[in-house]
């Protein structure tokens, strides 16, 4: 007889203001060190670009949701419609159903990595438009964060005991 592993519900809150601040400050610093049309990279923080920035943050958040889908399943209830308008969320919230063997340190690391992933992904998308020579660097950083996220949420504090036979 197979026993269910006890689960723990954890909530990760990614604050929009913190994401925007990190995106703007990193783009500004990268623009300072870049040559040529560096102002185009620094324009990410302009109010005129806010809609584009929000769309990129929402897409990166959806990537995070997909990476952790096994732990944060949400069924579509009723009819689903998407009017394709992007609204700025106050906070981006992921509620995860995780095994009890995942510790607080791993959750803190996971939260930091998700934040970092969104920042790097948004800047890489912006660089594809404004400063293509830097897009590869930020894409590599985002993919590195993705790999670390996958390894972190698979980590356990206790070894998983597997039987020799499935019966």
Image: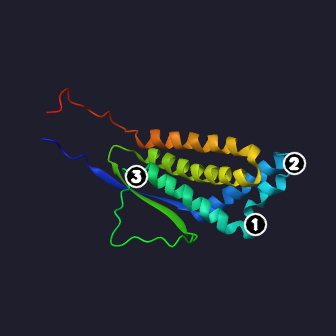
**Residue 145: where, in percent of width, then height?**
56, 43
Quadrant in which the C terminus appears = top left
Foreground residue among 61 and 14: 61
The local secondary structure at tag 3 comes to loop
**In the visual, does 125 lie left or right of 160?**
right
Write down the residue under mark 2.
36
| 2 or 1: mark nearer the eye | 2
Write down the residue under mark 1.
46
The disc placed on residue 69 is: 3
Residue shown at the point (33%, 36%) measured from the top left: 158
The local secondary structure at tag 2 comes to loop
Furthest residue in direction right, as rendered: 36
Q: Is residue 102 above or below residue 58?
A: above
**Residue 90: where, in percent of width, then height?**
55, 70
Q: Earlier in the sequence, mark 2 or mark 3?
A: 2
Q: CA distance from mark 2 to mark 1?
A: 19 Å
| C-beta proximity under 8 Å, tags 2 and 1 | no
Q: Earlier in the sequence, mark 2 or mark 1?
A: 2
Question: Badge 2 local density, few (<14 within 10 Å), some, or many (20+)?
Answer: few
């Amino acid at each position: 007889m197979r026993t269910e592993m006890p689960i723990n519900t954890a909530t990760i809150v990614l604050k929009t203001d913190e994401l925007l601040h990190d995106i703007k400050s990193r783009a500004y610093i990268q623009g300072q060190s870049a040559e040529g049309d560096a102002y185009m990279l620094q324009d990410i923080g302009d109010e005129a670009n806010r809609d584009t920035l929000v769309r990129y943050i929402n897409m990166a958040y959806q990537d995070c949701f997909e990476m952790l889908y096994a732990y944060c399943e949400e069924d579509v209830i009723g009819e689903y419609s998407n009017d394709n308008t992007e609204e700025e969320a106050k906070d981006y919230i992921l509620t995860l159903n995780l095994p009890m063997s995942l510790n607080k340190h791993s959750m803190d690391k996971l939260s930091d990595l998700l934040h970092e992933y969104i920042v790097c992904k948004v800047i890489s998308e912006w660089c594809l438009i404004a400063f293509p020579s830097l897009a590869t660097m930020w894409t590599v950083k985002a993919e590195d964060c993705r790999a670390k996220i996958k390894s972190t949420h698979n980590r356990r504090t206790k070894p998983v005991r597997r039987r020799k036979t499935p019966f």
